[in-house]
Every structure is written in structure tokens, then in C-alpha cells.
Image (tube, helix red, strand yellow):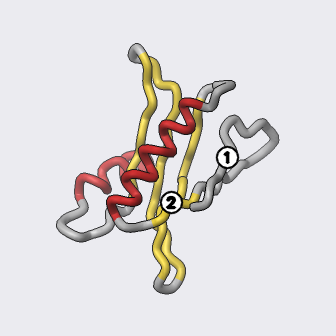
Amino acid sequence: MNEVWRIVRAFDLAEGDETPYGFALIAERAGHMLGTLGVICYWYGDVRFFTDRWFFAVPDPQREIGSALRAEAEALAREAGLKLVINLKQRGVGNVIYARCGST
């Protein structure tokens, strides 16, 4: 919970031209959470980018939920002047519900 809170608050705490540490998005319909995407800012040397800390969506054959979350995250990353890299860190055994990565 501490990590979720830190990421959610980070966008609000960034000032001026400062790149926020991260942000979190929630997809919901009729008061039910359908998915969430948490994004943090990483850097290697002089290269900075946003990447997923978590990315979950309920099973959705059309992938609309994951696509909507990703589109919103890409828009926020673009606004900050950084690329978005979706890693989809998978732990254990299971199915990846949304695993499409584009050119970012």
C-alpha cells in the first residue's frame, strides 16, 4: 500500500518542469474497478522513461480496458516529454491478460 500511495501522490507533488516520480490510473465502470496501471520514472545514464510498476485488467477479449489504460499513460508520458515502456513483469505462473507492446 505504501508503494501505491507514493506513486499516486507523486504526480500531484511534482512542481513546474519537474518530471513526476510516477502516476497511477484506474479503469472503472459503474463503480467497479476493471483495471489499474501504475507507472514510475526510471533512468539509465542520461535516458529517462516511464515504465509500469503494475498493470492489471480483468479478462477482456477485446483488450479495451488495457488499451484505454495504456493510451492514457502514453498521453501523460508524452506530456512529460518521456517515452512509456511497458514491461509487464510477470511473477509465477499465469496468463498475461494484456501483453501488446507497440513501438515505445
| x and y, in percent, of residue 78 in the image | 39, 60
Q: Taking 32 as reference, is 80 above or below it?
A: below
Report if residue 12 is visible in the image: yes
**Residue drawn at (48%, 62%) of the image:** 50
| x and y, in percent, of residue 89 in the image | 67, 53
Q: Which dot marks residue 84?
A: 2
Judged from this view, the residue extending furthest toward the left is: 16
Give the structural element (helix, strand or loop) at label 2.
strand
| x and y, in percent, of residue 100 in the image | 67, 46
Report if residue 59 is visible in the image: no
Q: Taking 21 as reference, is 66 above or below it?
A: above
Q: Is residue 95 left or right of residue 12?
A: right
Q: Taking 19 as reference, is 79 above or below it?
A: above
| x and y, in percent, of residue 73 in the image | 44, 49
* Amino acid type of the residue that numbered disc 1 sits on in the rendered structure: Arg
Q: Which dot marks residue 100?
A: 1
How many neighbours does mark 1 have within 10 angstroms: few (below 14), some (14-19), or many (20 or more)?
few
How many neighbours does mark 2 have within 10 angstroms: few (below 14), some (14-19), or many (20 or more)?
many
Q: CA distance from mark 1 to mark 2?
A: 13 Å
* Amino acid type of the residue that numbered disc 2 sits on in the rendered structure: Leu
**Residue drawn at (73%, 48%) of the image:** 91
**Residue drawn at (62%, 54%) of the image:** 102
**Residue drawn at (58%, 37%) of the image:** 56
The earlier-in-sequence mark between 1 and 2 is: 2
Judged from this view, the residue extending furthest toward the right is: 93
